[in-house]
Image: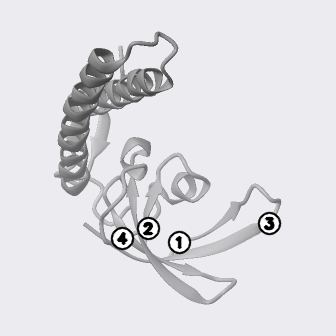
Amino acid sequence: MSRQVKLTREGFERLQKTLEQEQARLAEATRILQEQMETSSDTEDTGLEDAKREKMNIEARIDELEDTLARATVIEDHENEGRVELGAIVVLGNETTKKDMKVQVVSAPEATVTGGSLPRVSEDSPVGKELMGRKKGDAFVVNLDNGKQMKYKVKSIEY
């Protein structure tokens, strides 16, 4: 059984919009493919192959989006008030650079969708993993892939 995906309201709407765009692209790709098939006399026609591949790529993307949306639950209520969970907008203080950054913690599928006003951090990312369940004032260290460490402090949490 596929596990459910938690999305913010904004993320859910963005995924739906992306799905609509992909469906429009599929209709266009299908039309192009029809044209290629009608005008192509040569079976080795690269235009025809490209059109087929493009159509398959779009169909795969649509399947993926539909699957994600089918499993989606929109995060509405936050039972852990005062702690970081999905959908939280967190101001993080970078203890090394002394700069603050505002991020939203989201599920992995939502982190890949572009758009929105805030940088998104996936709950599966190194920072996201460390962030989940933290309270305001918590400091934590993230080990980066390059062996470096970053120290952050949770400055504020809002929903």
Instruction: Measure the C-alpha gap from mark 2 to mark 1.
Output: 6 Å
Pointer 2 residue? 135
Instruction: Measure the C-alpha gap from mark 2 to mark 3.
Output: 24 Å
Pointer 4 residue? 118
**Above or below: residue 124 compared with residue 31:** below
Tell me the residue at 31%/20% (across/down): 39
Camera-nearest residue between 104 and 40: 40
Neighbor class of circle 1 (other Cα within 10 Å; few <14, some 14-19, many 20+) is few
Instruction: Specify which label sits upstream in the sequence, 1 or 4.
Output: 4
Q: Secondary structure at mark 3?
A: loop
Q: Give the amino acid type for the residue marked by disc 3 in the picture.
A: Lys
Q: Give the amino acid type for the residue marked by disc 2 in the picture.
A: Lys
Q: Position of residue 45 (x, y in %)?
A: 48, 19
Q: Secondary structure at mark 2?
A: loop
Pointer 3 residue? 148
Q: Residue furthest right?
A: 147
Instruction: Measure the C-alpha gap from mark 3 to mark 1.
Output: 20 Å
Tell me the residue at 39%/42% (across/down): 109
Disc number lying in front (2 or 3): 3
